[in-house]
Image: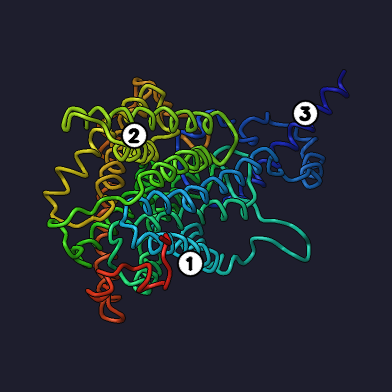
Amino acid sequence: MRKLIASIALGLAAFGVFGVSYAQDTAASAPVAASAVADAPASAADAAPAAAPAASEAASDAAAAAPAPVPNKGDTTWMMVSTLLVILMTVPGLALFYGGLVRSKNMLSVLMQVMVTFSLIVVLWFVYGYSLAFTEGNAYIGGLDRLFMKGIWDNAAGTFSLAATFSKGTPMYEIVFAAFQATFAGITCALIVGAFAERMKFSAVLMFMVLWFTFSYAPIAHMVWFWMGPDAYTGKEVVDAMNAKAGLIWQWGALDFAGGTVVHINAAVAGLVGSYMVGKRIGFGKEAFTPHSLTLTMVGASLLWVGWFGFNAGSALEANGFAALAFINTFIATAAAVLGWCLGESLLKGKASMLGAASGAVAGLVAITPAAGNVGLGGAVIIGLLAGLICLWGVTGLKKLLGADDSLDVFGVHGVGGIFGALTTGVFNSPNLGGPSAVGDWVTASVIPAADYSIATQVLTQAKAVGVTVIWSAVVSLIAYKIVDIVIGLRVPEEEEREGLDITSHGETAYHK
């Protein structure tokens, strides 16, 4: 019996020592969705009881020989599938959604702008974007440690570097994380295309995307999502130091599960600025710019809905309960938003439209993005239903107030929906309203108890995150558009715009009579 007890003590001590070593060695980058670790276990170092002094040397030897944690194959599979789903969202989902909304003479130009923008940003992501967003630098931008994906795998040894998830001792392959995040960067830039569709030079679009991606997307992603990972929090004495290495907005405690600020608000502000800088389409306010194919728009919206499950549920970084929570919240919030938009249209116009139903779906998807794993099911339904109504106002009443020709209502849906979703995340994250709360102590991965959760404080934090994103994106966008205008010009000549960008910019037509 004594030998058995001694063996157990040795094993536990070895596990405890290893846990500390691993936590120090794998403090890696990963986006934050604080509530996604409510069910995460405490660190091995905290869980292991103290071993007898006589066993310490043997424990150290055992720890040195212990195998390193290996990413779970199920998690890895889920993250690769999620990456594919986000690609589906963009090409063809977003491309068809936007393409159906423009006039037939500009169909291919929109498809090209979405597809080539996505491809351009994915390449830039692997050259320097990932490093700027997800490596240690300062509170605003990362460093160049992963330039050209340096160090992400050792081809000679056949080994892969690991990144943090949201659970202690549960790493993922960094190469998979980098691929997943590449799709976020790509679709964010592609979203902007809808604001200046039908009138901007193709070369100008690409030049602007390079500038905006570098100076707006990467910094905002770093500020919101970069932190040192749960395993870096080995004890209370290191908490302040680890927090100080994180992005500015993460340090504030803002919640953004899958990109309300980073993706939707960021892109929407850039689009709104672009609609002012490029100017209104010829005939705007005098001619009817009727969507040429609502059939394709509906197909695109449906693909967006399907792909968004990878976007939101994949942001849990693990195939666990919080991925499932994000999954079902994405499902029901979107359905509720479709109903909300259709209800609003029926009250305002006397009938609901297919365009409205498709727009409502996107509005719900946008609004639930920051909240996906951060709210309960009831909160998701309320967010979705209200998002449908509020974004309907965004593309009608607010659009008239702004006076901009935001061609495909990027700001009205993604800006308004993103802001609404970000703020209401702070409300419905409350455990008093069915939410999972937020992690209050990363050493033990324990959440803020219901009695201590302050909705007002969290909403204020969310508002600060929204404010920084709006101002940062607006300033960067204004400067980027101006540079592009000076260098190559923003807009196509009037005769080319009248003829259509399919022929004049690409020498093709979408349809042959």
Q: Label 1, secondary structure: give it.
A: helix
Q: Quadrant of the N terminus?
A: top right
Amino acid at circle 3: Ala
Give how far apart the Cα atoms at labels 1 and 3 are: 55 Å
Residue 121 sits above or below residue 243 on the image: below
Image mark for residue 68: none
In this rendered view, identify the residue nearer to me: 287 or 368: 287
Residue 82 relative to residue 173: left or right: left
> In which quarter of the view is residue 234 placed?
top right
Q: Residue at x 45, y 57 (%)?
A: 185
Q: Which residue is mark 1?
A: 120
Q: Quadrant of the C terminus?
A: bottom left
Q: Label 3, secondary structure: give it.
A: helix
Q: Which residue is mark 2?
A: 425
Mark 2–mark 3 contact, CB under 8 Å? no
Residue 348 relative to residue 15: left or right: left
Image mark for residue 9: 3
Disc 2 or 3, which lies upstream in sequence?
3
Residue 14 relative to residue 448: left or right: right
Q: Nearer the viewer, mark 1 or mark 3?
A: 1
Give how far apart the Cα atoms at labels 2 and 3 are: 45 Å
In this rendered view, identify the residue nearer to me: 206 or 441: 206
Q: Do we see residue 4 in this rendering?
A: yes
In this rendered view, identify the residue nearer to me: 305 or 273: 305
Render colour scheme: rainbow
Q: Nearer the viewer, mark 2 or mark 3?
A: 2
Q: Label 2, secondary structure: give it.
A: helix
Q: Position of residue 232 (x, y in %)?
A: 55, 46
